[in-house]
Image: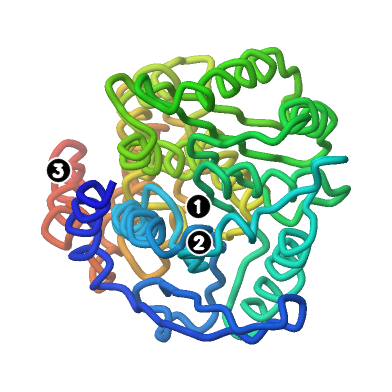
Amino acid sequence: MKKLLLLLLAISLPIVSNSQIKYESLSSQKLGETRQIKIQLPRNYEENKEKRYPVVVVLDGDYLFEPVAGMIDFYSYWEDVPEMIVVGVNQDGIRIDDTAYSENNFLPAEKGAKFFEFIGMELLSQLDQKYRTANFRIIVGHDFTSNFINYYLLKQSPIFQGYINLSPDLAPEMANRVTNALSTSESKKWFYMATGSDDIPSLKKNIMSFDNQLKNLDNKMVSYKFQDFENETHYSLVGKAIPSAISSMFEIYRPISTKDYNEILLQTSVSPSQYLADKYTSIEELYGLKRKISLNDFMAVYNAIEKTQNWEEYKALYKMAFDHYPGTMLGTFFEARYEEETGNPKKAMRIYQNAYGQEKIAFINTDFMLEKADAIKKDFGY
């Protein structure tokens, strides 16, 4: 196990070093003690004064924090997931006490009940007060702590939307309780669970049975993903599960892929510009994040319009471009293409010329726009 953790640290630390790592001591009235936590703030956190960030709480932070924080920093750098505040709760030597549950009702008891309240009532509250947090939270756990994170899902109004279960050591009745909670959930939830072919046999048996229950979920508000990693142990599966879990919870956040482009945008029955608008509306509704439309996504829709020759789509697209990239040539180019292809070449020529002095973007610069204007002038003799 130690060798695996050293490997994960070696992979993660070079990435994490570009972000801000803070080590804090948090005094807890619920626990009657001080707990050590690690916090990774997003890159440029201090510069982006108005920006708010989802929160990822990582139990077993003494060994899970670095791989989780590293992968989130990596994915967010490439804009596949939003930047997030990652918080690791150190539990070295006390994780069994922290996750204790009653043998009668199998709910958090003694130190476990206090730790449950510490996370929900103290840790998150202090994070919200001290940092610019968004109202989207994920929690991560491994075996004992993986079982524990699911107690938050059983609350009437769960404080976490995403649950990453790494080989959970399930308490009796946990599978039934979670299945019922997810079946009746009226708000969006993401639930991930992983095991491995060489996982601890007793854990794997219960996990596979749990998966069979969750496979039958019929609730559009729940996104469930399960993975059984071949040739992976109870510990090594963690390295594969973390990136998969994170990416699955932000599938719609990612830039438009080649698959989406071919299977969705190139279909003549689909409005590419409406697809783009709906994508970013969904991001705001699901994650509480108002995101600027990426240049990649604008270019994907642009290419789809050119390919399908559905020129009317440019009308909505250039308006979005003006909103998201004001002062650049992006909206001007799309507007000129609209006029050029809908029978107004003279107007298109003037719009191309009006780009002079605007900021270049992608392949669109002053020379390119003036060449487009000159081509129209030559073709029509203006």
Judge by depth and name the residue closer to the eye, 4 or 246: 4
Is 73 on the left or on the right of 100, as rendered?
A: left
**Disc 1 designates what residue?**
320
* Res. 148 visible in picture: yes
Question: Which label sits on residue 375?
Answer: 3
Task: Report x, y in % for residue 129.
Answer: 67, 84
Q: Residue at x 21, y 38 (%)?
A: 380
Q: In this rendering, would 75 be left or right of 10?
A: right
Mark 3 crowd level (few <14, some 14–19, many ≥20, 10 Å Cα): few
Image quadrant assignment for residue 184: top right
Q: Residues within 10 Å of mark 2 (few under 14, many from 20)?
A: few
Q: What element carries label 2?
A: helix
Residue visible at 74% across and 31% down in the picture: 172
Q: What element carries label 3?
A: helix
Q: Tag 1: residue type?
A: Met
Classify residue 52 by image quadrant: bottom right
Question: Mark 2 — residue?
Answer: 323
Task: Compare residues 49 and 354 and report the one nearer the observer.
Answer: 49
**194 to 149, vertically: above or below:** above
Q: Which residue is drawn at 60% across and 22% down?
A: 206
Q: How far apart are marks 3 and 1 (CA)?
A: 26 Å
Q: x and y percent of residue 157 in the render? A: 84, 51
Q: Are marks 2 and 1 in contact (CB under 8 Å)?
A: yes
Percent position of residue 175, x then y: 72, 27
